[in-house]
Amino acid sequence: MSEAVRTQAAAAAAAEGATGRAGGGARARLPLLDVLRGVAILGTLMSNVWIFAGPAAEWGLISGNAGISAGADASSPAGVAETVFRSLANGKFLSMLTMLFGVGLAIQFRSAAERGQPWPGRYKWRALFLFAEGTVHFVLVFAWDVLMGYAVVALLVAWLLTRSARAQRVTWIAMGGLHLAAMALLTAARLLASGGGTGGGPGADAVALYAEGGYAEQITFRLSHAVVLRVEPVLSFGLLVFLFLLGVRLFRAGAFQGDAAGRRIRRRLAAWGLGIGLPLNTVTVLGGSGFFLLERYAAAPVLAIGYLGLIGMVMDRLRRPGPLTSALTSVGRTALSCYVLQNALAMLACYGIGLGLASHWADRGPWWVMGLWAAICLVLVAGASLWLRRFEHGPLESVQKRLLRR
C-alpha cells in the first residue's frame, strides 16, 4: 500500500478514534449496522413488490403502467393505504442501502490499511463478483437490479479513497449538485411534455408476457430491452456516488458507534432528515407522477437520512436486543442472499410462471400486495435466522468469500 494511502487510512482511523476501541476494538462488529441493513433490505422489497404486482411488471415503470390500482379512488381507504405505503418506501430504503454499501467500503478500506494490504487490492474482485451476481440476477430474476450499479460505483469510490480528503469532498459535492440539476431538468421536461408519453414500447405485450408467458420468454424480453431496463443506475449515477461517499463520511465520523458522539450524530440525522425530508416528500407525492423523479431520486435520499437516524435513536433506547432486533440482525447479516431471495419469491408469487397473483388478483386492490410483502418478510426472517444457527454467513456471502480466497 502506498504511503499516501496509508496516510489516508491513518487519518480515517484517527477520526474514528477511541469510539472504535470503546465498541470493543477497531474490528468489532457494529450491531447497529446489521439492524440497518436488515431494515434496508426489507424496506427495498416494500417498494419493489409493487413492480412485481403491477400489470406490466418490470416494464411498468417504463410504460407508465406501474400501479395495480391506478383506476381506484385515491381518497378511498384502499387508495390512501396504497399511497402511504408506497410513499414511505419509494426510494428511501434503496438510498439507505446505498449509504450502507459506502459504510461497508469504508470498513474494507480501513481493514486493508491496518493489515498493510494493497488497496483496492482484493476489493476489486469483491466488486467484480457483485457485478457478475447482479448480471445473473438481472437476467434471471429482476430487471431493476441494483447490484450491477453498486459494483461499478464501488470501484470508483474505492479509487477515490486513495485520493486526498479534499478530492473526496469536492467529488461528493459535485456529484450531489450535478444529480440535483439533472433531476430538476428532467422533471421540467416531463411536466412540459404534458401527458406525453409513456415511453412507448411493448406495454400490452408486457402485460401478457408476465401473466401468461414462459420463463425463457421473460429472460429474452429482459435481454432484448436491457438498454432501457438498465437506465436507473445510469440516471442515478451521481446520486449513487454521493450516497456511497456519504456513507464513508458517516462511518468515519463515528455515526454508528455506541458512544455519546455517535448518539449525538444520530439525533442530528433524524432531526434534519425527517424535518426536511417529510415536507419534501409530501410535496412531490402530492405533485403527481410528473414529480416522480424528484420524489425517488431527490426527496427520498433526504428522508432516508432521517430514517437512518431515527432507527439509530430507537436502538439507543433499547436495553437489550429483542425478537425484532434479532430478526433484523439476521437479515442484515445475510443481506445479499436475502435481497436476491426476496425478488425470486416475489417473481414466483406474482408472475404467470408461478402463482400468477398479479393477474388473478388484479381487481382486489392493494391489500394483497401488502400482505405478500409481509409474508415474504416473514420467510426471509425465519430463513435467515435458521441459516445462521448453522453457518456464519449467508449462502451468497459464503460463495463470495470462497471465491475471494482463491
Image (tube, rainbow, N blue to C red):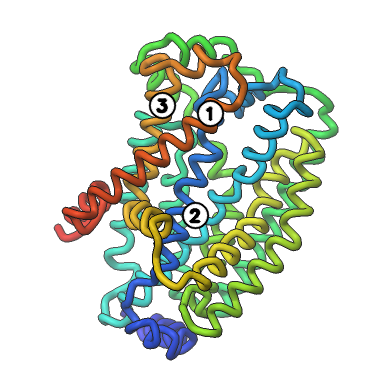
The three-letter code of the residue at mark 2 reads Leu
Label 3 vs 2, first from the N-terminus? 2
Above or below 250: residue 213: above
**Residue at disc 1, secondary structure:** helix
The image position of residue 42, as x and y in percent, is 46, 46
Image quarter hosting the C terminus:
bottom left
Label 1 vs 3, first from the N-terminus? 3
**Left or right: where does residue 37 sit relative to residue 239?**
left
Label 1 vs 2, first from the N-terminus? 2
**Residue at disc 2, secondary structure:** helix
Total marks in image = 3
C-alpha distance separating marks 1 and 3: 13 Å
Q: Nearer the viewer, residue 4 or 75?
A: 75
Q: Nearer the viewer, residue 120 or 403?
A: 403
- Point 39% across, 17% down: residue: 355
- Point 30% across, 75% down: residue: 112
Q: Residues within 10 Å of mark 1 (few under 14, many from 20)?
A: many
Residue at the spot of label 2: 97
**Residue at disc 3, secondary structure:** helix
Q: Are discs 3 and 2 less than 8 Å apart at CB?
A: no
Residue at the spot of label 3: 347
C-alpha distance separating marks 3 and 2: 21 Å
The image position of residue 281, as x and y in percent, is 74, 49
Q: Nearer the viewer, residue 229 or 73?
A: 73
The three-letter code of the residue at mark 3 reads Met
Q: Nearer the viewer, residue 12 or 91?
A: 91
Residue at the spot of label 1: 369
- Point 43% across, 19% down: residue: 351
The three-letter code of the residue at mark 1 reads Val
C-alpha distance separating marks 1 and 2: 22 Å
